[in-house]
Image (tube, rainbow, N blue to C red):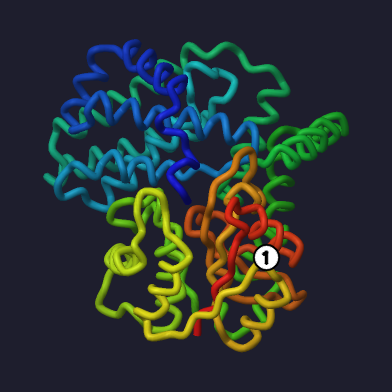
C-alpha cells in the first residue's frame, strides 16, 4: 500500500521511539549494534510497531511483523531464510509485548521468540550465523523477558482478550477486528459462566474459527472459485517479495500476480518481476498512476481495459477469463479500517455465490478473501481519485 499507511514520520511516534531507545539497557544497545541495526533503524522499526499497535486497536489492522524484520535485516549481507524467519518471530514478539502498554502483551509470542532464538543458536553453532549477530538477537529476547517480568497482573477481561488474540493469530494470522473482539469477548464470558474451563473455551474458539468462511477460503475449502483463472493466480506479497520500495509497490505486486497467471515473468524471481513492472509503470515512493498499470499490461503483451468503479463490469470481465487490478482505498476493505490510503489489489475470480475473490498484496492473511459486490464498489469509490478497475487479458 502507499507509504502513508504506516506513519513512519509521525513526530509523536518518533519521539516515543526515541524515548524507548533511551531506556534500553547497554547490553541491548550493544547487541543491536553488533547485529548491524543502527539507532535510527531501531527507532523507525519501533515507530512501525507503535503505529501498528494503534491501528490494530482502532481498526483491527493485520500487521506483518516479518516484513519489519526483513526491512531491518536488509542492510546485512547474506541473510539466510532461517535467520530471517527467526528475526520475524522475535519482531512479532516485540510487536506484541509493548512495555509501554503492558495489558497488550502476549505470552505465546514470547514463547515463540525463545523458540526462534534456539533456532538462531543452532545456526550459530553450525557456523551459519556470526556470534555477534546472535548476541544481538539474544539481547532483544532478554529485553522482552524483562518487559514481561515487569508486567502488572492481568485482569480477567485482559486474559480473555489475550486468549482471543492468540486464537486469531493461530487460526487467521491476524488480530481480531473490533467487532469480532467485542462479540467473542462476550461469548467467552458466557462460556465461562456456563462452567467451561479456559482450555475448553480456547479449544471451542479454535474449532469455530476453522469452520468459518474466512478460514475455509484461506485454506481451499468453502466457496470454490467458479472462474477457472482464480486458482491459477499465485499470491505475491509486496513486503515479503519486493526488493525495494515495498511500501509503495501494491500496483506492480498486484500486476505481478496477474502476470504469473498469464505465464509472464518466467526466469524472474517475484522481487525481480515486481521491480521490472514497477520500472515500466513508473512506480515511485508515492505509488503507481493509472497509466502505469496499463503500461505494465502492455509489457506483458496483454490488452488492458479500464472502467470506473462497477462491480457488474468487473464480474463481466472475470467471466470472460480476464483478471482485474482494482485501485481503491486500503482502509475501505475489511478487516482494515481507521484511515485512508490509495491501494491496488488483484481481483482474481468469483466464488459460487458470485462474491469477488481478492488477493491483497499488502495482507497475506486475507488472500484470497471473498467480498460482496457492494464491498468491492465501496473499496474502489473510497479512493481519493475516484477509483478505477483494469481488466487484463
Between residues 107 and 290, which one lies in front from this camera angle? Answer: 290
* Residue 228 to residue 169: above or below: below
Residue 370: quarter of image = bottom right
Q: Is residue 90 left or right of residue 135?
A: right
Q: Position of residue 128 (x, y in %)?
A: 15, 47
Between residues 320 and 53, which one lies in front from this camera angle? Answer: 320
Q: Is residue 305 left or right of residue 244?
A: right
Q: Position of residue 92 (x, y in %)?
A: 44, 37
Q: Residue at x 46, y 66 (%)?
A: 254
Q: Badge 1 is on which residue?
A: 370
Q: Is residue 231 visible?
A: no
* Residue 124 to residue 23: above or below: below
* Residue 244 to residue 325: above or below: above
Q: Residue at x 36, y 52 (%)?
A: 246
Between residues 53 and 300, which one lies in front from this camera angle? Answer: 300
Between residues 282 and 118, which one lies in front from this camera angle? Answer: 282
Number of residue marks = 1
Q: Residue at x 39, y 40 (%)?
A: 89
- The residue lying furthest to the bottom in this view is 320
Label 1 element class: strand
* Residue 377 to residue 267: above or below: above
Q: Position of residue 113 (x, y in %)?
A: 39, 35
Graded by Cα atoms within 10 Å as few (under 14), some (14 to 19) or many (20 or more), the crowding at tag 1 reads many
Residue 260: quarter of image = bottom left
Q: Residue at x 68, y 77 (%)?
A: 313
Q: Position of residue 214 (x, y in %)?
A: 67, 58
Q: Is residue 264 visible?
A: yes
Amino acid at each position: 500500500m502507499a507509504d502513508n499507511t504506516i506513519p513512519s514520520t509521525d513526530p509523536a511516534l518518533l519521539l516515543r521511539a526515541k524515548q524507548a531507545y533511551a531506556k534500553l539497557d547497554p547490553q541491548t544497545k550493544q547487541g543491536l549494534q553488533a547485529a548491524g541495526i543502527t539507532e535510527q533503524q531501531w527507532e523507525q522499526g519501533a515507530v512501525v510497531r507503535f503505529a501498528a499497535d494503534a491501528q490494530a486497536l482502532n481498526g483491527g489492522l493485520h500487521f506483518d511483523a516479518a516484513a519489519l524484520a526483513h526491512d531491518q535485516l536488509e542492510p546485512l549481507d547474506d541473510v539466510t531464510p532461517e535467520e530471517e524467519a527467526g528475526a520475524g518471530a522475535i519482531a512479532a514478539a516485540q510487536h506484541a509485548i509493548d512495555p509501554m502498554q503492558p495489558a497488550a502483551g502476549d505470552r505465546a509470542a514470547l514463547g515463540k521468540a525463545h523458540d526462534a532464538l534456539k533456532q538462531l543458536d543452532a545456526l550459530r553453532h553450525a557456523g551459519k550465523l556470526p556470534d555477534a549477530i546472535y548476541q544481538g538477537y539474544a539481547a532483544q529476547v532478554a529485553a522482552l523477558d524483562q518487559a514481561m517480568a515487569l508486567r502488572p497482573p492481568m485482569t480477567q477481561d485482559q486474559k480473555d482478550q489475550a486468549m482471543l488474540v492468540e486464537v486469531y493469530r493461530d487460526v487467521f494470522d491476524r488480530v481480531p477486528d473490533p467487532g469480532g473482539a467485542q462479540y467473542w469477548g462476550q461469548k467467552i464470558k458466557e462460556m465461562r459462566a456456563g462452567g467451561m474451563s479456559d482450555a475448553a473455551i480456547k479449544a471451542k474458539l479454535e474449532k469455530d474459527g476453522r469452520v468459518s468462511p474466512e478460514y475455509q477460503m484461506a485454506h481451499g475449502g468453502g466457496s470454490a472459485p467458479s472462474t477457472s483463472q482464480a486458482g491459477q493466480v499465485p499470491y505475491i506479497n509486496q513486503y515479503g517479495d519486493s526488493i525495494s520500495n515495498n511500501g509503495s509497490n501494491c500496483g506492480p505486486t498486484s500486476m505481478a500476480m496477474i502476470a504469473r497467471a498469464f505465464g509472464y515473468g518466467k526466469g524472474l524471481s517475484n522481487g525481480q518481476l515486481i521491480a521490472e513492472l514497477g520500472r515500466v509503470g513508473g512506480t515511485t515512493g508515492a505509488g503507481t498512476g493509472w497509466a502505469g498499470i496499463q503500461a505494465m499490461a502492455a509489457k506483458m503483451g496483454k490488452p488492458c481495459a479500464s472502467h470506473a468503479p462497477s462491480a457488474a463490469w468487473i464480474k463481466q470481465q472475470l467471466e470472460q477469463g480476464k483478471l482485474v487490478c482494482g485501485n481503491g482505498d486500503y482502509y475501505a476493505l475489511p478487516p482494515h479500517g481507521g484511515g485512508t490510503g490509495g491501494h491496488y489489489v488483484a481481483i482474481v475470480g468469483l466464488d459460487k455465490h458470485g462474491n469477488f475473490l481478492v488477493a491483497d498484496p499488502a495482507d497475506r492473511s486475507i488472500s484470497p478473501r471473498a467480498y460482496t459486490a457492494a464491498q468491492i464498489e465501496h473499496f474502489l469509490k473510497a479512493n481519493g481519485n475516484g477509483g478505477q478497475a483494469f481488466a487484463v487479458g
